[in-house]
Image (cartoon, grey):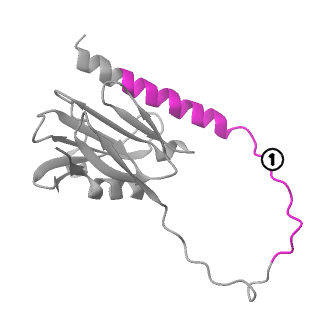
Amino acid sequence: MHRNTYLLVSALSLVAVLLAGVNIGRKFPVQQSPSKLPTPSPADSPVQLQAQPATKSYQNRFCRLAFDYPSDLTVLENASGSAAFTGKTADEGIILTCQGRVPRPSVPQERIENIRIGSVSATLYHARTASEGAAFDSVIFTHPQTQFDVFLAGAGESFRKLILSLSFIP
């Protein structure tokens, strides 16, 4: 088996194990202690604006990429240059890998978008998992300096914001 294929399978296996662990952890009940403070009435409480989640900057020297990701995600880096970002739920994961040739997902043409990352054209795939039918997006493009294919996958609004913050580093 080619080295890059082995690394991609290893990275995806790592993410699968982490997501399975998160799903198992969600099944345990969380003990909440009852609050002894009086609940404020709606007239007494100020209007609360929904805060945007804080972000952290991330740089991957192997892939030569930088982007912002939600600060509540945990980064797991691999020696091969791959990285997995895991959250509290299975819906919050992001994966990054770079290799010579990334296989393209098999999705219908209406679920494929052509986008631009800086001056580079990229393809955004809107797919669903086979087992649960959960929606996720993946972006694949060729890095202009390394000529490696870059694969980023995730779901939700935070992933869309991550795509917008992508930049190349020298």
Does residue 64 appear to the left or right of 6 in the view shown? left
**Image point (40%, 52%), residue name:** 69
Q: Say which of 119 and 66 sits in front.
A: 66
Residue 31, position in %: x, y?
80, 47
* Residue located beneath label 1 in the image: 31
Residue 10, position in %: x, y?
38, 21
Q: Residue furthest bottom?
A: 43
Give the magenta-colored segment's residue range.
10-39
Q: Say which of 162 and 136 sits in front.
A: 162
Residue 127, position in %: x, y?
33, 44
Amino acid beneath label 1? Gln
Give the image quarter of residue 143. top left
Does residue 147 appear to the left or right of 34 in the view shown? left
Q: Is residue 36 magenta?
A: yes
**Image point (15%, 56%), residue name:** 118
Residue 141, position in %: x, y?
17, 42
- Residue 129 vs 156, above or below: the answer is above
Residue 65 showing in the rendered view? yes
